[in-house]
Amino acid sequence: PSPRSCQPNGANEEALQYEIEELKQKDLALDQEIAQLLSEGYSLEELEKHISLLHEYNDIKDAGQMLLGKLAVIRGVTTKQLYPEYDLELSD
């Protein structure tokens, strides 16, 4: 059983209410951020495209990291040791 299922109903309800309030605050903050970006001249389509490209970038980066990890295991070195060989910065 999860920790929440062991709590008395009042405590469980209180935790859910807190979680709901947190989500409402996050929703409001995101709405404000979207409004600010729109006021700066960005369009929703542009923002959605940017988010899509970021997801694609992250997927490609993850695949690259996985390949570097496998290569490091094969060579018996750390991934960090491979970075200079491929002209990568540690912040990449």
Image (cartoon, grey):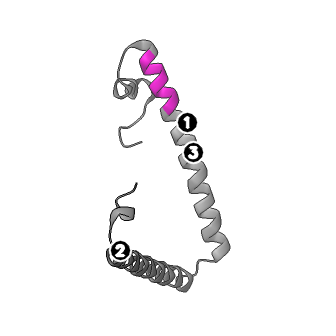
Q: Mark 2 against mark 1, which lies toward the viewer?
A: 2
Estimate how packed mark 1 is, as few (under 14), some (14 to 19) or many (20 or more) residues with alpha carbons within 10 Å. Answer: few
* Image location of residue 30, percent across then percent down: 48, 77
Secondary structure, magenta segment, majority class: helix
Q: Residue at position x 52%, y 27% from top?
A: 67
Name which of mark 2 and mark 3 comes first in the sequence: 2
Please give left or right for residue 60 compared with residue 92 in the image. Answer: right
Q: Is residue 67 magenta?
A: yes
In what element is the residue under mark 1? helix
Q: Which mark is residue 59?
A: 3
Q: Residue at position x 35%, y 38% from top?
A: 90
Residue type marked 2 = Ala
Q: Which mark is residue 63?
A: 1
Q: Nearer the viewer, residue 75 or 25?
A: 25
Circle count: 3
Q: Residue at position x 44%, y 76% from top?
A: 23
Q: Nearer the viewer, residue 90 or 25?
A: 25
Q: Residue at position x 64%, y 70% from top?
A: 46
Name which of mark 2 and mark 1 comes first in the sequence: 2
- Residue 73, above or below 25: above
Tags 3 and 1 touching, CB below 8 Å: yes
Query: Start and end of the magenta stretch?
Result: 66-73
Residue type marked 3 = Asp
Estimate how packed mark 3 is, as few (under 14), some (14 to 19) or many (20 or more) residues with alpha carbons within 10 Å. Answer: few
Estimate how packed mark 2 is, as few (under 14), some (14 to 19) or many (20 or more) residues with alpha carbons within 10 Å. Answer: some
Residue designated by label 2? 15
